[in-house]
Amino acid sequence: MNPELSQLSEELLTRVLDPVLHKELSALNCLQSQLVEGERLTLKLHFPYPIKAYQWSLEQQLQQAFSLLIQEDPQIPVKELKVDFTWSALRCLPEGIEGLESVANVIAVASGKGGVGKSSTTVNLALALASAGARVGILDADIYGPSQSHMLGLDGQRPRVKAEKQMYPLEAYGMAVMSMANLVTDKTPMVWRGPMAAGALQQLLLQTAWPELDYLLIDMPPGTGDIQLSLSQKIPLSGALIVTTPQDIALIDALKGIEMFNKVNVPILGVLENMSSHVCSNCGHKEAIFGEGGGERIARQYGIEVLAQLPIDKQLREDLDSGTPTVVKSPTSPLAMAYSEAGSKLAAQLYLQAQQSSGGPELVFSDD
Ligand SMILES: Nc1ncnc2c1ncn2[C@@H]1O[C@H](COP(=O)(O)OP(=O)(O)OP(=O)(O)O)[C@@H](O)[C@H]1O
């Protein structure tokens, strides 16, 4: 490649910011190859997170920057730009933690307080990542109220046994799913003490024959007690996402959740503020029922990102109740878009945090 054209590509990538990490594309080392055919320059850009939600606007920005560059210097021999986008998940684990063989990243979705929308967030985020092309699984570890199988229309299904002490996960919308709800009956109370519950959930994780996955999301039990602490220590977590409402009482518990993960050195990948506002379906009036700005306050306090602020939405609840979450039922709706953005941000944070820690991420899978 002509060195001047290499310089052109480099210059182009310094002029456009990565939409999720807000860094110059050149700093992301995403340029995989560049090819000139006649007057056309083709760049192959590779991202460490699902890029689908941003691809269109990124392409526009690159095209604009390219037009400016060739206007500034009419000697540039290429006149047309083509960009190919690819991405792959990176295995990002804190140092000294040995991951699961077939799962690149296990992410805990946690909330201090119950009922704030942790399970709803887990399922919609997982589906958003899956629709962006990632291989995704969900482990429902919420033994107090396992709701994943209901939200995914898997009620009453039983996992197939693979071999002694090994089960295949169930499948929903292209994702691998395992939930205690599919192993017990409705009438089996799960009244386990802390260590016993954590042990059982660890077994559920390890005795499931997970296929190759980029992300396994764990719907954690609400709270910050024994079970949650043991789980966070026993499961090889790449990171945790905290779900909260903006209400003070939920935020206090969310802080405890962050502190708990900090104590066991699990990186916090962000905060997702659920039920941030409500828009009246009759008059369109917007109201912050649970208060305002809470997620942002704790994010600032801990130097983490707010991945999304999602409204209270009747359709979202109805879609979950009917076993077809909004991300699959209405994939182009504003809510599905918000989950899609949050999913990309979550995956990008994983990469960023691993890059900042000493080891750096290890490339394990490719979608080529
Ligand atoms: N943004 C939202 N708009 C409307 N309803 C919501 C929203 N988020 C969650 N819900 C509904 O609120 C209820 C509680 O949500 P969910 O089960 O996700 O909470 P949770 O934090 O997982 O609760 P727990 O941990 O106590 O099981 C569910 O009926 C769900 O459908």
Image (cartoon, grey):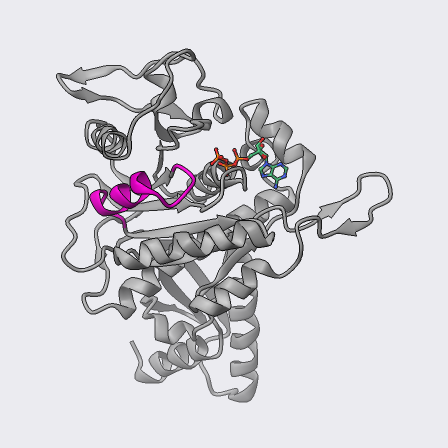
Is 235 contained in the magenta span? yes
Residue 357 placed where, x, y %? 25, 68
Residue 349 placed where, x, y %? 39, 60
Residue 170 placed where, x, y %? 34, 22
User: Quadrant of the rendered structure where residue 83 is?
Assistant: bottom left
Residue 124 placed where, x, y %? 50, 39
Query: Is 343 left, or right, of 201 in this rendering?
Result: right
Is 57 contained in the magenta span? no
Region rendered in magenta? 221-237
Which residue: 38% across, 20% down?
Answer: 181
Q: Residue furthest right?
A: 283
- For the N terminus, the image quarter is bottom left
Which residue: 71% across, 52% down?
Answer: 288
Q: Nearer the viewer, residue 162 or 122?
A: 122
User: Quadrant of the rendered structure where residue 304 is?
Assistant: bottom left
Q: Is residue 52 visible?
A: no
Tally the numbered discs: 0
Q: Nearer the viewer, residue 368 or 257?
A: 257
Which residue: 55% across, 63% down?
Answer: 296
Instruction: Report the image quarter containing ligand 1.
Output: top right
Q: Nearer the viewer, residue 227 or 348?
A: 227
181 relative to 287, above or below: above
Query: Is 365 left, or right, of 13 in this rendering?
Result: left
Q: Is residue 138 visible?
A: yes
